[in-house]
Amino acid sequence: MNPIYEYCRFKTAPRALQSVPEAARERFSERAKASGGKLFGCWRSVVGLGLARDEGIAVTSWASVAAAKAATPIADAECTLLKAMVRPLTDAAPVYEGVYVFRWFDVAEAEWQDFCDLSNAAWPNMESVFDVNICGFWKSLDTQPPASKTLLLTRYADLSVWEASRWWNKPVAAANVSMNRFKVRNEIIDSTVAYPALPIF
């Protein structure tokens, strides 16, 4: 498994991700292959939610930071280097249909391990109760202490499942184990933002 990942939020020509989304995936796949990397996944905007209509996200795995930095730069993209932390278990691409939510967290470095432990302990219950899959949990290598930035990638069957699995939205009692941990986790999060996206297979 490649331990280093690269998150790229990219732009395309108007409506390209709606008409020929596979072209964006192929672009990132070929880039990864040319430099010894592996495309983990490519996603397009849920038009009108979070990402702009002509924005997408690509995640690539690399053997090292040096390998990632040696790859061909992507024009009109914001890229961040990441290190896998507890998830994913392999760098095999997720293949679930549904809505994928990329959620960034800002947490003080001194509290990051508690944040990680609470998240990791909550996920098995959450995944057993709701139609969700935790696909990735990465720590930014571009953010230095005393700050930290973490990316969580979760697949939901649809947006109604996302809504039903919010700790603040009276979820089903079977999810109490995970929801109680998320409540505690919320107290140590400085800020968070989420972007829903659709997979390009």
Image (cartoon, rainbow, N blue to C red):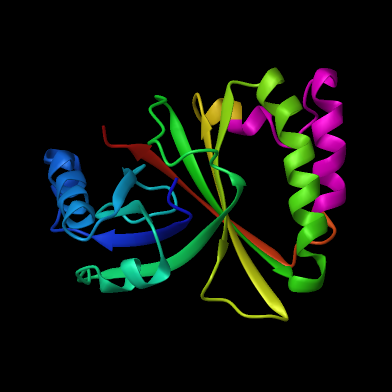
Residue 67 in the figure: left or right of residue 82: left
Residue 27 in the figure: left or right of residue 166: left
Q: Quadrant of residue 74?
A: bottom left
Q: What x and y, as percent, mark residue 36?
A: 25, 56
The verdict on residue 177 being magenta is yes
Position above or below: 40 against 81: above
Q: What x and y, as percent, mark residue 108?
A: 76, 72
Position above or below: 36 against 98: below
Q: What x and y, as percent, mark residue 149?
A: 61, 67
Which residue is pictured at 57% across the width and 76% down the height?
143
Q: What x and y, as percent, mark residue 104?
A: 58, 58
Which residue is pictured at 40% across the width and 59% down the height?
7
Residue 144 in the figure: left or right of residue 107: left
**Main SS category, magenta section:** helix
Which residue is pictured at 15% across the width and 51% down the height?
30
Q: Is the N terminus in the top left, top right, bottom left or bottom right quadrant? A: top left
Which residue is pictured at 69% across the width and 77% down the height?
147
Instruction: Give 71 or 58, whichever is nearer the viewer.
Output: 71
Range drawn in magenta? 162-185
Position above or below: 77 against 168: below
- Count the numbered circles shown: 0
The verdict on residue 165 being magenta is yes
Instruction: Give 83 or 148, whichever is nearer the viewer.
Output: 83
Position above or below: 57 against 82: above
Instruction: Give 143 or 35, whichever is nearer the viewer.
Output: 35
Q: Is the C terminus in the top left, top right, bottom left or bottom right quadrant? A: top left
Work out whether residue 92 can be spotted.
yes
Work out whether residue 15 can be spotted.
no
